[in-house]
């Protein structure tokens, strides 16, 4: 698929997801998800470099325990794999840009950090997400939070104007990650920082990479943690820290892959359900969500 086709498919998929999420009971806090699948790591998954022990399908397990009190309704519309603002040193008066801002949960949290004197900008390409985020911002009564329509490979943001770039389970969906990393470096001020939660994978079989369903669900478009860090550094960023990893179990990988059956994948007429099941078992422990931290050097 071309880059344009990939973006159109992803946008349509997330438009359906937010429509479905909004139609659910407002009291359902089943968690933040990528597409229909959840990106929070199965409760039975091996967990490295983190002490998260809560129900992994809940926002709490993704690092949002405190923020849920402030914005509980918006949390149920959130789709992600971690809290990029957890322990981030975002300060009052700063400017924050959220890549793939979705329904706006992280925008509201960022606004709570920067206060009335700061500025928060969301970027999203999906009209349904943008409309939802703007409504949530209006309900929150914030006048220094905005959502701009655009793609993260060409951000509608002036160069060198941003103190923080954050993102939550979005860059894996980009068909041109090098462009995204370069754009992060462009918009950040010297000394500006980034905090990105995303899914990475050490290995994926070609048949899974070819699945459009798995791509939409934040799996097929992943790169390795090493390549992710290398991409950030190649853009001139000091990507010096991965401070959290949540490793996915076979059960969670099945959810990420869109609950795969033979018909879910391209050119798999000769693949049995047993084949898919065994393949996912082999992948267990090689796919995880990671939080990347770093800075644009001052020079």
Image (cartoon, helix red, strand yellow):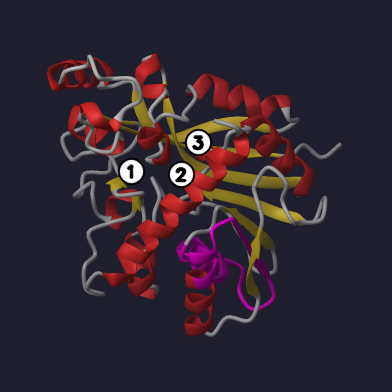
Inter-mark Cα distance, 2 to 3:
7 Å
Left or right for 284, reference 231:
left
- Judge whether 193 appears above or below 45 on screen: below
- Judge whether 136 appears above or below 76 on screen: below
Inter-mark Cα distance, 2 to 1:
8 Å
Can residue 208 be seen here? The reply is yes
Residue at 36 percent across and 33 percent down: it is 214
Return the x and y of residue 123 as percentages of the image width and height. 62, 58
Return the x and y of residue 172 as percentages of the image width and height. 50, 36
Please tell me whether residue 41 belongs to the stretch shown in magenta: no
Return the x and y of residue 288 as percentages of the image width and height. 36, 30
Please tell me whether residue 115 belongs to the stretch shown in magenta: yes
CB contact under 8 Å: marks 2 and 1: yes
Which mark, residue 39? Answer: 1
Residue designated by label 3: 172
Q: Which residues are magenta?
A: 103-131
């Amino acid at each position: 698929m071309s880059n344009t086709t990939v973006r159109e498919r992803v946008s349509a998929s997330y438009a359906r997801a937010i429509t479905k999420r909004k139609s659910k009971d407002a009291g359902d806090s089943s968690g933040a998800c990528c597409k229909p699948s959840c990106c929070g790591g199965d409760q039975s998954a091996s967990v490295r470099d983190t002490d998260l022990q809560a129900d992994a399908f809940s926002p709490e397990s993704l690092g949002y325990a405190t923020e849920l009190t402030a914005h509980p309704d918006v949390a149920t519309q959130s789709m992600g794999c971690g809290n990029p603002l957890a322990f981030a040193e975002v300060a009052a008066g700063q400017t924050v840009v959220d890549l793939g801002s979705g329904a706006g949960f992280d925008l509201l949290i960022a606004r709570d950090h920067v206060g009335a004197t700061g500025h928060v900008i969301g970027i999203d390409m999906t009209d349904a997400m943008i409309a939802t985020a703007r409504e949530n911002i209006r309900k929150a009564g914030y006048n220094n939070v905005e959502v701009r329509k655009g793609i993260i490979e060409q951000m509608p943001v002036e160069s060198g104007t941003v103190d923080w770039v954050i993102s939550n389970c979005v860059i894996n969906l980009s068909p041109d990650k090098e462009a995204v990393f370069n754009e992060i470096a462009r918009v950040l001020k010297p000394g500006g920082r980034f905090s990105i939660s995303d899914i990475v994978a050490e290995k994926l079989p070609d048949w899974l990479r070819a699945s459009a369903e798995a791509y939409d669900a934040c799996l097929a478009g992943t790169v390795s943690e090493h390549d992710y860090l290398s991409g950030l550094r190649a853009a001139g960023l000091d990507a010096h820290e991965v401070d959290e990893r949540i490793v996915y179990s076979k059960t969670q990988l099945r959810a990420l892959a869109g609950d795969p059956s033979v018909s879910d994948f391209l050119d798999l007429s000769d693949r049995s359900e047993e084949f898919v099941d065994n393949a996912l078992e082999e992948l267990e422990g090689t796919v995880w969500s990671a939080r990347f931290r770093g800075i644009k050097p001052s020079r």
